[in-house]
Amino acid sequence: MNCLTHFCKTTHGIRRLGSASIDLAYVACGRFEAFYEYDLHPWDVAAGILLVREAGGCVSDFSGNEKNLTGDEIVAANRLVFPEFLENVSKFMQD
């Protein structure tokens, strides 16, 4: 809840469509700047990870690891906001 509260206070808005694959596709096409989630499955994120990376975005787990992404933890964003977004997600999800 701390992470969500932080982004509610520091962004222009939060949208959640209920589907990780759609949210990742929206990051890839630029409709969303960033996405994070946890407790997903590989089939929820595999195609979206490819879309984001092919579009020039970044994807990792909450620790910044870009390999072996299974959906347990995922952060995706465009290259401009990824470092700051990852830092905030990591900080608040550790609490």
Image (cartoon, rainbow, N blue to C red):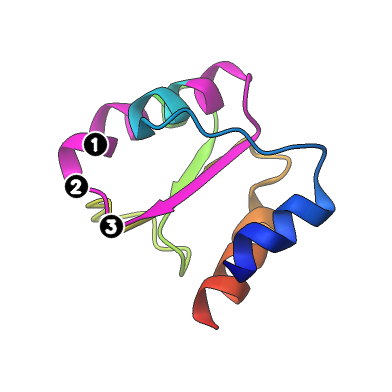
Q: Nearer the viewer, residue 31 or 8?
A: 8
Q: Percent x, y for residue 52?
A: 45, 29
The residue labelled by disc 2 is 41
- The reply, left or right, for residue 79 in relation to residue 63 is right
Disc marking residue 39 = 3
Task: Write the start and end of the magenta stretch as one range.
Answer: 26-50
Which element type, helix, strand or loop, lies under badge 3?
Answer: loop
Alpha carbons under labels 2 and 1: distance apart: 5 Å
| Residue kind at label 2, given as amino acid type | His
Whether pointer 2 and pointer 1 mark residues with C-beta atoms closer than 8 Å, the reply is yes
Residue 75 can be seen in this image: no
Q: Quadrant of the N terminus?
A: bottom right
| As drawn, 28 above or below 41 | above
- Label 1 Cα crowd, 10 Å radius (few <14 / some 14-19 / many 20+): some
Q: Name the residue under label 1.
A: 44
SS class, disc 2: loop
Residue 7, disc: none
- Mark closest to the chain's N terminus, 3 or 1: 3
Residue 67 locus on image (x, y percent): 30, 55
Give the residue displayed 19% in from the left and 47% down from the top: 41
Residue at x-position 58% and y-position 63%: 89
Query: Which of 8 and 46 lies nearest the eye of the viewer?
Result: 8
Residue 80 position in % (x across, y down) = 73, 40
Tell me if 52 is positioned left or right of 4 in this view.
left
Give the quadrant of residue 7: bottom right
**As drawn, is 11 to the left or to the right of 17?**
right
Q: In which quarter of the image is the C terminus?
A: bottom right
* Residue type highlighted by circle 1: Asp
What's the amino acid at mark 3?
Answer: Asp
- In magenta segment, residue 64: no
